[in-house]
Image (cartoon, rainbow, N blue to C red):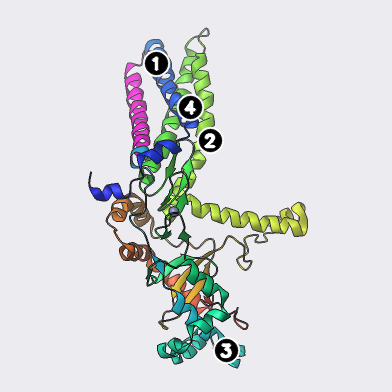
Amino acid sequence: MSSEEDRTKINWNYRFRSFKGWIPIIVLAYIGFTQYAFCYEFLYKEVNKILGRRSVFIGLCVVHGWLSFTLLSSWFFIFYFGPGKPPGKVELFDLEKYVRTGNILTQKLNDNSMMSTTDVSLNDTITRIGSMLTIDEDEKVDRRDNNNNNSNDTSLEKENEGFSFIDPPEIFFCDSEGLPFWCSTCKSIKSLRSHHSSWYNTCVPKFDHYCVWIGDLVGYRNNPYYIVFVFSFWLLFLFDVISMICFSSKLHNYGKRHILHPVLILMYIVDCFWLLMITSLVYTTVKHLINNETTMDMLQINKRRKYLRDEAIKKTGRWGVMMQIFRGHDIDDHSVVTPYERYINVQHPVLPNIRLVIRLKMDEKPYKKDIWSNIKDTFSIRDKYKSLSNSSSILQFDNESFPDNFKALINEKIQKNDFRIMSNVVPTNIN
Ligand SMILES: [Zn+2]
């Protein structure tokens, strides 16, 4: 094993300590039970002995065995690889100069009556006024003076003492103020779609979810095996149920005295129940795969939707909301800002010291490429992340992960004035 691989692997101590395994043990025991019930009670005793279909018995046994093997080996690899750690730390972004220039520009725009002229695009005005602000002019602004005016800046500076700063990348995910997400435990900017896992005491890039069925967290390292696991799990139960439906009818007709073994009846019921549950899991897995999104992305969308629905219920009551939905009224209204919004911070396309904060619509998927690229991404991301070493290589990779269609969408939003200048001066005329 190379040292590079070790860097992204979570320490086994944490892995064992975090294992809460009674559901996975039940799942494992049930898979063991199906080997006995399906292969011995059903295939060997019923299909082979009673029906005398030896070739069917062997064929179905091989398929069942192969699916079980795929299931168990993918499960093993989910554990073996683990969700993964970030390949390195990302230092804080030096955003102060952007905030200072943003403040000056917002102030000038507030003072400027041009803003009331509707036929002039906000972006054009910003570019025109912003281009008149030279870097020298920003530097002339006394920092202490600026800090006295803006308490946010002072607290930010105090908080950031002792940290090194780097130039921010072209695009990064941020909060409503335009600040990047910082993990105080890992002492790093959250990059590569990371979320912190308190169980593993580390940020996990491309954090997906904690799967109760398998008893482990799904992250970028074990995501490909998780997909194989979900599919083989689903196919195994589907195959068992279909085989039993096909051959049980024959058994039923075989002799009046012959009834299905109680073990098989139990297996049939449990398989059908699980098949229903796993079908929804397969659906979401496929959806995430082709949209290049994670369960965390979906959770945020659901939280936002729930928030809007709860707010609507407060106003019009449950019945009123149902009627609104019935009339085709959009509950997921983008114009309403909730605590569950996604924002990105982008470099202004023309002005070097201006950054823009853009709110994303919930259906705007920042990493979505064409289907095959998305699938390839999911299955090859482990090797790509492994080769990243320092802040700049991580940030460069992060920025290259945004496809051209997303960058085009950002430009379109800028042209439509759908942004806020990163500053801590409250704009008066700007939406
Ligand atoms: Zn962390």
Residue 124 on image: x %, y %? 49, 87
How far apart marks 2 and 3 lie (CA) works out to: 56 Å
How far apart marks 2 and 1 lie (CA) works out to: 25 Å
- The three-letter code of the residue at mark 2 reads Leu
Magenta: main secondary structure equals helix
How far apart marks 2 and 4 lie (CA) works out to: 18 Å
Q: Which quarter of the picture shows residue 317?
A: bottom right
Residue at the spot of label 2 = 276
Residue at the spot of label 3 = 119
Task: Tell me where the magenta segment starts and ends, as one range.
Answer: 51-77
Secondary-structure class at tag 4: helix
Q: Residue at x 55, y 89 (%)?
A: 108
| Cβ–Cβ under 8 Å for marks 4 and 3 | no
Of mark 2 and mark 4, the one earlier in the sequence is 4
Residue at the spot of label 4 = 26
Res. 379 mark: none
Q: Which quarter of the picture shows residue 44?
A: top left
Secondary-structure class at tag 2: helix
